[in-house]
Structures are given as C-alpha cells and as structure tokens.
C-alpha cells in the first residue's frame, strides 16, 4: 500500500500538468502566444522556485527522456515528409543542415566568447547547442496561426529541421569530448562525424525498407498491435545505429521518410497515432525542461544571454541562411523567411545535458543561456511569424484537411491504391462528363469532394476545377489518370 501511495501523487500531478497544458494551448492560440512557451512557463511554475515547489534536478532522466522524445519527433517528421515535395529542396536543405549549422556555431560561439567570457571550446559548444532549428516548434506555431507558406519554403524548413539535429548532436558530443580530454586534437572528431553520418544514413535507408516489408508481412492478430510494432521499430532503428557508432537520429528520420513514402498496412492510422504520440512527448518534454530550470539563475545571465539570442536571430541565422543558399534559385523573400523561421525549441536544452553530465566546466552557464535563447526565440520569432510572412509576401492560407467520410486502409502490396487527385484550373477534363473522358476500365471514381459537398460520381457527372477526386485502381493506371487530369488546355 505504501509503494502504491508513493506513485499516486506523481500520477495525479503529471495528469494535472498535462491537462493544464492542453487548456493553455487553446488559450495561447486565441492570444497569439505559442503554446510551447506556455508549456515551459507551466513547468517553471510547478518547479522548485514556483508555487508548485516540485524539486527536480535530474539531468540524466532529462537526457534520456529528451533522446526518446527527439527520436520519435524525427520519425514522425519523416513519416509526414513527401519526397516529391522534398526532392527539389534536397541540396538547399543539406546545405542549411551542414554549412548553416557550422556557420551558426562559429558566429554564436565568437559572440559568446566575448560577452560571457568563456574559453573558445566552451563558447563553440554553446554555439553548437543552439545551432539547429526545431521542427516541432516551427510547425506547431504555423498550425496555431493557421499560416501557410508559399513555394518551397515549408518543405525546405521541414527537411532542414529534420536533418540538422544529427549535425548539432555530433558537434555537441564532439566538443564535449574535446573539453573532457584537453589533450585531444580537434581533427580527431572528423572520422567520428563521417562514421556517424554514413552508418546512420545507410542503416536508416535499409532498416526503413525492412520495416515496410515487416509491416506488410507480419499479419498481427489485432490492429492495435501495429502501433506497438512501430514503437519497437523506432527503438530498434535508433538503438542499432547508435550502438554501431552511427547517428541514431539520422537513421530514424530517414527510416521515417522511407516508410512515409511507401505503402504499408494501417499507414493512415499509424501516422495519426504517431502524431498524437509526438504531441504528448513534446508537451511532457517542455514541462520537464520547465521543472529543471531555476528562474533566479536565468536572471543572472539575462543581459548577455539576451544579446547572444538577438545576435542569433538577427545576424547569425540570416548570414548562415544566405551563405548556405547563395547558389540556390530561391528568391530573396523566401530566403529571408527561412532565416526568420529559425525557431529553437526543446533540442538545445536537451543537448545541454551532455556537457552537464560530462561535468564540463561552465556547463551550467551553457544550460541557462540556451534556455534563455529558447524562451526569447519562441517569444519573439514565434509570435511574429504571421507578420513577417505578410511583410515578405510569402504567406498563404493553411490548407485544412477536410473531414472525409470514406477512409481506405491499403493492403501494403501497392497493387491497388486509393488516391486523391485534384482537378487544377484550366484542366482539359474540367467541365466534361466522366463517361466522355474514356478513362481506363481498371480505375474507379469513388467520391468527389467539391467544396463542402460530397458528390457520388456517375458517368454523367461533370468534373469541375478544384474537385478532389478519390480514385481507386492499380498504381500505374492511377498515374496515367493523374497525368491526364493535370494537363491544361
């Protein structure tokens, strides 16, 4: 009874904080305040220096929770990545994730060296900690503001934030190792970087394909077990890559991309499930990070930390973006928007646990400054995204996913698929009856979404521009229909 009683209060407190966070997210959306910022404040209020008085200072637990959270966030991001949209921005994204991260690390490290009076390795470590953008922070803010972005901006941000985390993790781990072993030469970490990226990339690609085959062939007795299988696969892919010396984060992201662009059983259900799991882990992570910080310690570094944060937002990120995209065809307005949407989220604070656990000198200063940078980034950049997007004329109305009465679970074989085809303006099929279009007999027009209406197609039904048509048939035939519908007069 005593053991049970000791678990009751933490369960109650955790549930109450989670529920409070959900209510805060709704309030934040109405007030225009990013929900992530409210999650942090709730955690801080519940902490040892707030009314809650919860004494929590376990960096090991925080790191373990953070690694698991980041792995699932990256996997979920991979599942949602459309390779057709990502392919045109591949070179730009890789440049931002590598050169951009290195430039940001160097510039922020230089400023930190003079403002915080840290030695060069420690200053560069701080720069590496805050060098990567945060996918979950960026897209949660975009969703809250119902903000869409034109052209290739959104897929570029999505891809960059997925692949720059492994680079930042490598820099933090490498610099932490150098600080822990002062006699070690800096160039000794280069082979480590190549090993991590190659092993992580190859295993992510191979294990992603294995995961698709396993999903489609295992034939589990209960549908709910497929979500358990997906969790096991994420852990296996991350763990195997990390144990073999690769980047587990890169591996799970690439595996997620492979799965997201393949046909497998219960694909839609598992995507929704991982979306919910990511929200849960993200809220929990920000609450834990809020519990971990001491506001009094933040005040002691407030002025130099604010200066470093403003330099990151207004100088380092824009310079890194423009240099990394110097040879890209993206227009200046798009590059400027990419530069401003460089939100920092939970990742920098998770990364600070590495030097803290390694007992690197001044690691606590790095933690406090990184936390301050995350706060100001979400507060300043997160609240001004719609304004900047309108000012740069790159804003677009977010596309709401309509509620559809007809759902389809693919068999995973890929032989027959249900695909939605949108009739574009000026299409050669617009205004014509389906029966007159002489589409192949192997394809079936199942349902048409026309505005808020659901139209059951018949041979006499005339297609209209803007119609979203659900088509069932073999993939090669569907591609033929897509090409025909996409033709313009």
Image (spheres, rainbow, N blue to C red):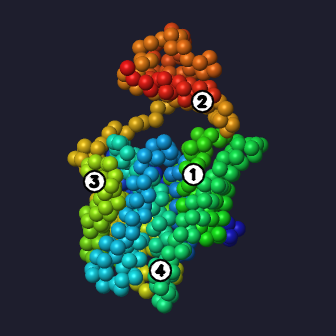
Q: CA distance from mark 3 to mark 1?
A: 29 Å
Residue assigned mark 1: 256
Q: CA distance from mark 4 to mark 2?
A: 51 Å
- Front: mark 4 or 3: 4
Residue assigned mark 2: 476
Which of the two discs, 4 and 3, labels the residue nearer the N terminus? 4
412 lies left or right of 93: right
Against 319, is 470 above or below? above
Residue assigned mark 4: 187
Which of the two discs, 4 and 2, labels the residue nearer the N terminus? 4
Which of the two discs, 2 and 3, labels the residue nearer the N terminus? 3
Which of the two discs, 3 and 1, labels the residue nearer the N terminus? 1
* Element class at badge 2: helix
Q: CA distance from mark 4 to mark 3?
A: 34 Å
30 lies left or right of 7: left
- Front: mark 2 or 1: 2
Q: Is residue 183 visible?
A: yes
Against 287, is 406 above or below? above
Which of the two discs, 2 and 1, labels the residue nearer the N terminus? 1
The mark found on residue 336 in the picture is 3
Asked whether the beta carbons under mark 1 and mark 4 sit within 8 Å of each other, the answer is no
């Amino acid at each position: 009874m005593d053991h049970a009683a000791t678990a009751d209060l933490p369960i109650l407190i955790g549930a109450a904080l989670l529920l409070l966070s959900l209510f805060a997210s709704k309030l934040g959306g109405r007030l225009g305040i990013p929900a992530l910022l409210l999650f942090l404040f709730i955690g801080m209020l519940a902490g040892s220096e707030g009314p809650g008085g919860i004494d929590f200072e376990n960096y090991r637990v925080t790191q373990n929770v953070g690694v698991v959270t980041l792995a699932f966030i990256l996997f979920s991001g991979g599942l949602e990545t459309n390779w057709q949209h990502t392919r045109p921005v591949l070179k730009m994204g890789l440049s931002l994730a590598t050169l951009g991260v290195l430039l940001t690390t160097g510039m922020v490290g230089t400023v930190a060296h003079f403002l915080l009076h840290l030695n060069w390795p420690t200053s560069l470590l701080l720069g590496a900690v805050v060098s990567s953008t945060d996918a979950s922070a960026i897209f949660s803010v975009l969703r809250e503001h119902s903000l869409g972005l034109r052209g290739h901006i959104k897929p570029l941000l999505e891809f960059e934030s997925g692949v720059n985390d492994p680079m930042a993790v490598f820099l933090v781990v490498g610099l932490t190792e150098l600080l822990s072993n002062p006699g070690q030469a800096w160039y000794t970490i280069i082979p480590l970087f190549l090993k991590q990226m190659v092993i992580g990339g190859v295993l992510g690609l191979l294990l992603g394909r294995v995961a698709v085959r396993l999903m489609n062939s295992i034939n589990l007795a209960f549908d709910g077990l497929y979500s358990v299988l997906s969790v096991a696969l994420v852990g296996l892919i991350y763990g195997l890559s990390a144990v073999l010396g690769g980047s587990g984060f890169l591996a799970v992201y690439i595996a997620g991309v492979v799965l997201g662009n393949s046909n497998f059983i219960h694909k839609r259900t598992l995507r929704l499930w991982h979306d919910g799991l990511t929200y849960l882990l993200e809220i929990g992570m920000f609450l834990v990070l809020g519990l971990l910080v001491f506001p009094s310690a933040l005040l002691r570094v407030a002025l130099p930390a604010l200066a470093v944060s403003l330099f990151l937002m207004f100088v380092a990120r824009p310079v890194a973006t423009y240099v990394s995209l110097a040879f890209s065809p993206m227009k200046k307005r798009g590059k400027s928007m990419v530069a401003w949407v460089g939100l920092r989220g939970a990742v920098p604070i998770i990364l600070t646990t590495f030097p803290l656990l390694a007992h690197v000198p001044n690691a606590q200063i790095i933690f406090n400054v990184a936390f301050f940078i995350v706060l100001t980034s979400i507060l300043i950049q997160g609240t001004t995204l719609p304004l900047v997007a309108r000012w740069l004329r790159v804003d677009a109305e977010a596309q709401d996913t309509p509620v559809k009465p007809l759902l389809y679970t693919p068999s995973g074989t890929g032989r027959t698929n249900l695909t939605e085809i949108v009739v574009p303006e000026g299409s050669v099929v617009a205004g014509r009856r389906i029966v007159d279009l002489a589409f192949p007999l192997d394809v079936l027009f199942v349902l048409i979404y026309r505005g808020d209406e659901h139209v059951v197609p018949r041979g006499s039904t005339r297609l209209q521009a803007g119609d979203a048509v659900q088509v069932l048939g073999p993939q090669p035939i569907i591609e033929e229909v897509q090409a025909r519908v996409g033709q313009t007069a």
